Image (cartoon, grey):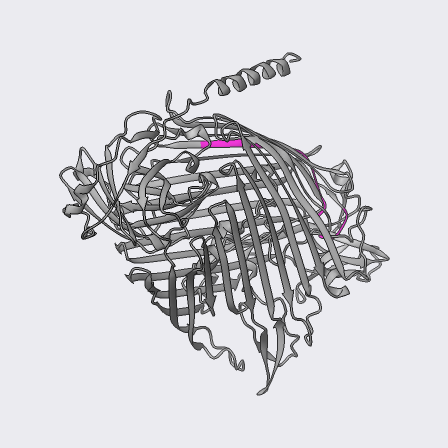
Amino acid sequence: MKKLPSILLILFSLLFNYSFAQEQDSIPRKAYETRMITGNPPVIDGRFDDPVWSTVDWGGDFTQRSPYEGKDPTQETKFKILYDARYLYFAFRCFDTDPDSIVKRMSRRDGFEGDWVEVNIDSYNDKRTAFSFTTSVSGVKGDEFVSNNGGNWDASWNPIWNTKTNIDSLGWTAEVRIPLSQIRYGNKEEHTWGLQFTRRDFREESRSVWQFIPQNSGNWVSSFGELRGLKGIKPQKQIEIQPYIVTQEETFEKVEGNPFATGSDFKLNAGLDGKVGLTSDLTLDFTINPDFGQVEADPSVLTLDGFRIFFSERRPFFIENRNLFDYNYASAEAGGPFTSDNLFYSRRIGGAPHGSPDLLDEEYADIPDNTAILGAAKFSGKTEKGLGIGILESVTGRETALIDLNGERRKEVVEPLTNYFVGRVTQDFKEGETVVGGMFTATTRNLEGHTLDFLRRNAFTGGIDIQHWWKDRTWFLAANTVFSRVEGSTEAIMNTQTAFEHLFQRPGADHVGVDSTATSLTGTGGTVKVGRLNKKWMLETGVTWRSPELELNDVGFMTNTDEVNYFLWSGYRWTDPFFIFRRLQLNYNHWSRWDFGGNNLYQAVNSNVHSTFKNFWGVGGGITYENKDISNNALFGGPALRKSRGIAPWIYFYSDQRKAVQFQANAFFAWGFEKDHPQTVRISDYSIWIGIQPTNALNLSISPAYNQNERKIQYVTSLDYQDNTRYIAGTVDQRTFSTTLRLNYSITPDLTLQYYGQPFISRGRYQDYKYITKSMARDFSDRFHQYADAEIGYLSEDEEFAVDEDQDGVTDYTFSNPDFSFIQFRSNLVARWEYIPGSEIFLVWSQGVTNFGDPGEKLIPDFTGNLFSEKGRNIFLLKLTYRFLK
């Protein structure tokens, strides 16, 4: 066994040297020469019968990129390019040896189903960004903004362009017309742009490209071919104005005596969205009184650990060009609950009000569900010299709750007028091999005259980041720093210090302390990492930290502070098919964590494998071993708690995703163990996804999931007893079941119907109540005192437990029964018609039901018996938009 480390070191060195030996030789850069149209432009009908197409030559000679890299393509592809003063024109001839077998699946925009062909245009010629336009054989459009040299593909970008397709005896064809106003380029007499084409052969699940770029090269945009011959085109001043009008009818259960719960509510609303090209490089996007009624509801979630839940952004204004404002300062390889931490989290804008009114027994209140966004504007773009700029400004309104007492009404402010500012700049050097950037955010709340002093008045965050690539973009060094400063009343800063993310009040944490007189708080954080990516052997290692005082949650997202994390990830992948595999990757991780007091909190190692077979099925799995886990948060302000060592294996497999019926199954398990206590934690999680494609226009899926989480120490509450604080916990058995249903029906590429529904139940039962004694004891039993039957009793009328610790017949303290059964159903049915390019009509039906069941019942009977026992809230919405384009 002593020789094992030496053997591993030798194998590692051989693997390292072998990976460098496989470096690709330089690949010649291709070029295509286009011509300007002097007569009539082509009619976009997918047929190439316009004489103007004969004025340019066909381009082609594609190379397979996957699965058999560098080989001949499974099907041949050719293209032509023309232009005039306002448009680019593309003609695609996609040959197919069996035209009757072409897969013509349809979807909504950006669905990328079936056979398709794609063009990427680096019109900035900055070697890092590109505009992507995809046409499927069924005529569905896809468009993405590509950044970070192919590392980020933003499908939220929706330009206006046209395409038509046709199937014939040779395969299929497509014609594309792209307005020059929809892309960005410099003001010069002659242009050379980066150019790339990709063809997908769905039956073989292969990708072929015009300019060959090896999968492990680490490059994409920087290795494009070139489009030449563009002369005399001037930057287009893009102006788009899109007004909208919305009618909404909401129905819900009528409540007698409540003047606000009348059973229905009607609203009529209007607003305006716009886009103005200020220069050839910079664009102003704005929205006035935006409406997002067509946006899909968030999934239901219920957790007991206290950490914030990250919900993805779904609102169109905020997701378009969101990559410009991204400042994720952690590493996904660092693990932990904070990989979504970011200086900007757009869901903070227009969220639920922070305040709630204090009501008398006979009072009723009408409280807004969300804060109204009065307006927002984004100024963004990138200059020819590589300077990227993103500025966002948004104002949300002062919100009030309307309170009624027997017909007499008053108002109480629940959210102040608030201004949000986000600014981001980046500068590329050496064609993006080095990128330096910075970011600054400011949140300002007008608290004058309100009883909202528990909110922070001002919040500022910022950071500086740098990333440098070398050795043909294989190795990189990245570093960033962040800072925060929050200001407010002593109450607001006290709330910040004692919030779950900080917990300055926890006993035993000598490096932090609550300052009840403070009116501001300043913190820092950052990450330094180095890695080798985009080759067969990959590596990333580094350190990320958050000081105890860091606070980002006014306009950012942050789950925890007071941590220093070390991480290492290494992987090896085979991208060329061999043996039974189409693709194979092996990974290794390890992590360690400390707090700012120097206490080692966490140690874990992990290994995992992911594979796709030649028959297009796949399987993967892994295992994590936690050697040490000490939580500063588990007791919600109590002392640090030593948690059990644990092991967590997981596995998944999936079928051929090209088939009409597909499925995927996942299973995850975790066990915590101690001496003489083999299962202090037991977690089982199962999920299945089944997808069905009965026709090219229709697909549906169902994905049930079941989770069981049993823990012997789960925090319940804390209370004072005899000059001490009792941190009360129990053994919890939480079981959660949900099913996600989806249906997509594409009548035409521009007329679609979508349904989303999710029934959800989470039930928790507690027993074996205890209070914490020695939270860091090595022996599990020494960490708590479990109440004897003579010490605790249940008061069913009050739904609480009474504790008599000294057993003198007098109740010392009580706490509420923590058992729960939370039931919810959410659904959206959306019909969307793009009646002319850029202009849409939405018909929406949203339904929501929230109920509470009986924790004593079995899970499924409780679920089915209570899901629709109360009338849900139904929203019927009609939204009409019209885009004026210049």
In the picture, measured across the screen, residue 676 lies left or right of residue 31, that is right
Asked if the stretch drawn in magenta spans residue 638, the answer is yes
In front of the other: 442 or 66: 442
- x and y, in percent, of residue 334 in the image: 60, 38
Q: Residue furthest top?
A: 3
Visible residue check, residue 625: no
Above or below, comparing residue 130 to residue 756 in the picture: above
Q: Which x, y percent locates residue 755?
A: 36, 57
User: Which segment did they paint magenta?
Assistant: 620-639
Residue 495 to residue 784: above or below: below
Residue 466 image point, x, y percent? 60, 40
Q: Quadrant of the N terminus?
A: top right
Instruction: Please identify the quadrant where the C terminus is shown.
Output: bottom left
Quarter occupied by residue 114: top left
Residue 317 placement (x, y as % from top left):
46, 60
The foreground one among 237 and 839 is 237
Up/down of 196 relative to 3, above or below: below
Q: Relative to residue 458, is residue 610 depicted above or below? A: above
- Residue 799 in the magenta stretch? The answer is no
Is residue 653 visible in this depiction of the protein?
A: yes
User: Magenta stretch: dominant SS?
Assistant: strand
Residue 751 located left or right of residue 617: left
Outermost residue to the right = 723
Q: Which residue occupies the extreme front position in the image?
A: 189
Which image quadrant is residue 136 in?
top left
In-front residue for pair 144/795: 144
